[in-house]
Amino acid sequence: MRPFSHSRLAPLLSSFVATLALFAAPASAEPVLLTCPGIVQAQYSPGMTNTPQVVTTAVSGTFGPCVGVPLSLLSASFGGGGTGTLSCLAGSTQASSQLTWSDGSVSNLSLSILVTVRPLGEVVVAYSGTVASGRFQGANVLMTLVLAQTQVTGCFTAEGVTATVGPTVLTITGS
C-alpha cells in the first residue's frame, strides 16, 4: 500500500469543489454591458407649473444603435411612467418602465431620480435603478435625459408644461 500523499489529494479536492460549485451555485445572469442613445418623450398630467404638485408622467421612446454586449441587441423601444411631486423647478418621482429589445425580449426597469435640474421646465435628469425582472434581471441601469419643452411660458400658466422630448442615453451593466 502506498503512503498517503497530500500532493495527490489537492487536484482531486479541487475537482470535487469545482464540480460541487456547478451544481450548488445558482445560474448567473446573462452578462450585459450596453450603451444605447435614444429619444424619449414625456407627457405630464396635470402639467408642470412653478408650484409643486402630484403629477403622473407617461414616457415612451426608442433607443439605438446599442453598443456593447450582447452584440445581438441593436435597439429597444421604451415605455412606462410614474407619479411624483413635480414642478418646473424641482421634483422627485419613482418610475416603472419596460424595454422591449430588438430580439423581442423584455426588461422591466425600476428607476428612481438620482439627480435632477429643471430650469424653466426643461428636464435634465439622471435615473438609476435595476432591471427588476425579465432579461438582465438584477443588472444596474442608468438613464440620463435632457428633455426640452416647447411651451416656453408653460410654467407660468394654469395648464403648465404638458410635454417634453429630447435625447437620452441608457446604460445597462451586470453579469
Image (spheres, rainbow, N blue to C red):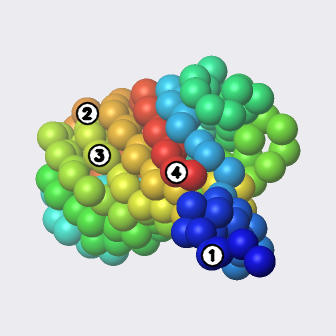
Sequence-wise, which precedes: disc 1 or disc 2?
Answer: 1
Sequence-wise, which precedes: disc 4 or disc 1?
Answer: 1
Sequence-wise, which precedes: disc 4 or disc 3?
Answer: 3
Which residue is label 4 attached to? 174
**Residue 17 image position (x, y, % from top left):** 65, 71
Sequence-wise, which precedes: disc 4 or disc 2?
Answer: 2
Dot 3 falls on a residue whose secondary structure is strand
Sequence-wise, which precedes: disc 3 or disc 2?
Answer: 3
The kind of residue tagged 4 is Gly
**Residue 139 image position (x, y, % from top left):** 53, 56
Of residues 23 and 75, the one nearer the viewer is 23
Classed neighbour count for the residue bearing mark 3: other residues with Cα under 10 Å, few (<14), some (14–19), many (≥20): some
Determine whether label 4 and label 1 are within 8 Å by CB. no
Spatial distance from mark 1 to mark 2, Cα to Cα?
A: 84 Å
Spatial distance from mark 4 to mark 2, Cα to Cα?
A: 40 Å
Dot 2 falls on a residue whose secondary structure is loop
Identity of the residue drawn at 46% across and 51% down: 141
Which residue is label 1 attached to? 4
Which of label 4 and label 1 is nearer to you?
Answer: 1
Dot 4 falls on a residue whose secondary structure is strand
The kind of residue tagged 3 is Val
Q: Quadrant of the N terminus?
A: bottom right
Which of label 4 and label 3 is nearer to you?
Answer: 4
Q: Is residue 70 left or right of residue 103?
A: left
Which residue is label 3 attached to? 125
**Residue 158 image position (x, y, % from top left):** 28, 58
Determine whether label 1 and label 2 are within 8 Å by CB. no
Residue 152 tag number: 2
Of residues 42 and 169, the one nearer the viewer is 169
Spatial distance from mark 4 to mark 3, Cα to Cα?
A: 22 Å
Which of label 4 and label 2 is nearer to you?
Answer: 4
